[in-house]
Image (spheres, rainbow, N blue to C red):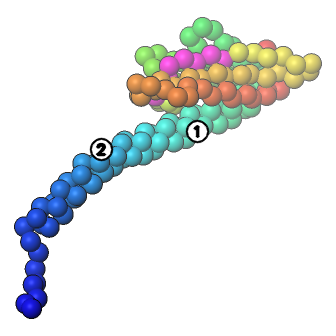
Amino acid sequence: MKRRSGYTLIEVLTYIACLTVILTVAYPTYHRFVRGSNNLRRNADDIARALNAGERWRNDVRAATGPIRATADQFVIPQRSGEIVYTVSEGVLWRQSSDGQRIAALRGVKSSAMQLETRQRVTAWRWELELASGQKQVLMRPLFTFQAVTGAKP
């Protein structure tokens, strides 16, 4: 009896068909996970940027030397060196210091509202911030709330 070595054409075609089915299923799945990973990274970056802007705002409020003024389009914080002005326009939160330097403190802002809260003998400010989402379907809205207490009377 002769021993055969090698593969038959039917075996090779069967292996190719199995590999094709596996790759056809795996390719879209891989890209879905890559897209999800990129969205997760983008969301984490947005959260970090919002937290950094919120901490900077809180530090500015805590360092206020006089009453803070809030209007519909501006938030003015008096400081020893002058005033710091926060404004939101066209989806960008701008921070302007007393020396006139205006920087984009946060981009991608959908809405922003800063409100005074008086509690007994404490004056506090609340900043409610919503970031714009780049995704078509949003499972969770990117909302943030920051609070800061100041010793200055409103």
Report the Cα–Cα distance between label 1 and label 2. Answer: 36 Å
Q: Name the side, left or right, on which 120 lies relative to 2.
A: right
Spot occupied by residue 111 in the image (x, y as percentages of width and height):
54, 17
- The local secondary structure at tag 2 comes to helix
Q: Viewer-nearest of labels 1 and 2?
A: 2
Name the main secondary structure of what is drawn in magenta. strand
Spot occupied by residue 5 in the image (x, y as percentages of width and height):
10, 84
Do we see residue 94 in this rendering?
no
What amino acid does circle 2 point to? Pro
Q: Nearer the viewer, residue 120 or 153?
A: 120
Whether 109 is among the magenta residues is yes
Q: Name the side, left or right, on which 20 lies relative to 95.
A: left
**In which quadrant of the rendered image does the N terminus lie?**
bottom left
Q: Residues within 10 Å of mark 2 (few under 14, many from 20)?
A: few
Q: Nearer the viewer, residue 16 or 68?
A: 16
Q: Residue furthest front?
A: 1
Query: Compared with residue 29, is residue 50 higher up or lower down, i.e. above or below?
Result: above
- Name which of mark 1 and mark 2 comes first in the sequence: 2
User: In the image, what residue occupies the spot 24% across and 48% down?
Assistant: 24
Q: Residues within 10 Å of mark 1 (few under 14, many from 20)?
A: some
Query: Compared with residue 71, is residue 11 higher up or lower down, i.e. above or below?
Result: below
Q: Nearer the viewer, residue 2 or 40?
A: 2
Query: Compared with residue 9, is residue 29 higher up or lower down, i.e. above or below?
Result: above
- Residue identified by numbered label 1: 52
**Mark sitting on residue 34:** none
- Residue identified by numbered label 2: 28
Q: Magenta region: which residues?
A: 107-114
Q: Name the side, left or right, on which 73 lies relative to 21.
A: right
